[in-house]
Amino acid sequence: MILPTKHIRPDRALLAVGADVLGCLREPMTVSRLWDEIRISRSDRAVSAPINYDWFVLALDLLFIVKAVQFDRGLVQKTVS
């Protein structure tokens, strides 16, 4: 689930979705705006399979757990280290 397996394609693994989230997170955004950006970004690329909202939230949770993003005043932003 986090890493690709024989049942989960590399573009659907949570690490790949998390990388897409970090790529779209150029500025602090609300979760709904970030979700819209991810859907647009993944629909523009033919190799990326569409994901559902649950999978997006799991990737966002993973990024939060590893302290790659933070949630502050209703906005998701990259963590500055």
Image (cartoon, rainbow, N blue to C red):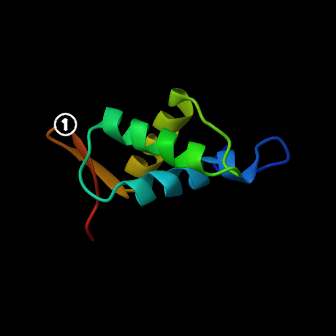
Q: The C terminus lies in which quarter of the figure?
A: bottom left
Mark 1, Cα crowd under 10 Å, few <14 / some 14-19 / many 20+, is few
Location of residue 76 in the rendering, given as x and y in whole percent from the top left corner:
28, 46
Q: Which residue position holds label 1? A: 74
Helix or strand or loop: what does disc 1 sit on?
loop
- Give x and y (percent) for residue 16: 60, 54
Quadrant location of the N terminus in the rendered image: top right
Residue 51 quadrant: top right
- Left or right: 27 with respect to 43? left
Residue 30 is drawn in which quadrant?
Answer: top left
Residue at (76, 47) in percent of width and height = 9
Front position in the image: 71 or 51? 51
Please say if 34 is above or below 22: above
Outermost residue toward the bottom? 81
The residue at the point 68 percent across, 51 percent down is 11
In-image side of 23 versus 77 (left or right): right
Location of residue 73 in the rendering, given as x and y in whole percent from the top left corner? 14, 40
Q: What residue type is labelled 1?
A: Gly
Residue, x 49% and y 42% (percent of image)? 40
| Front residue (pair 34, 70) | 34
- Relative height, residue 75 to residue 18 (above, below): above
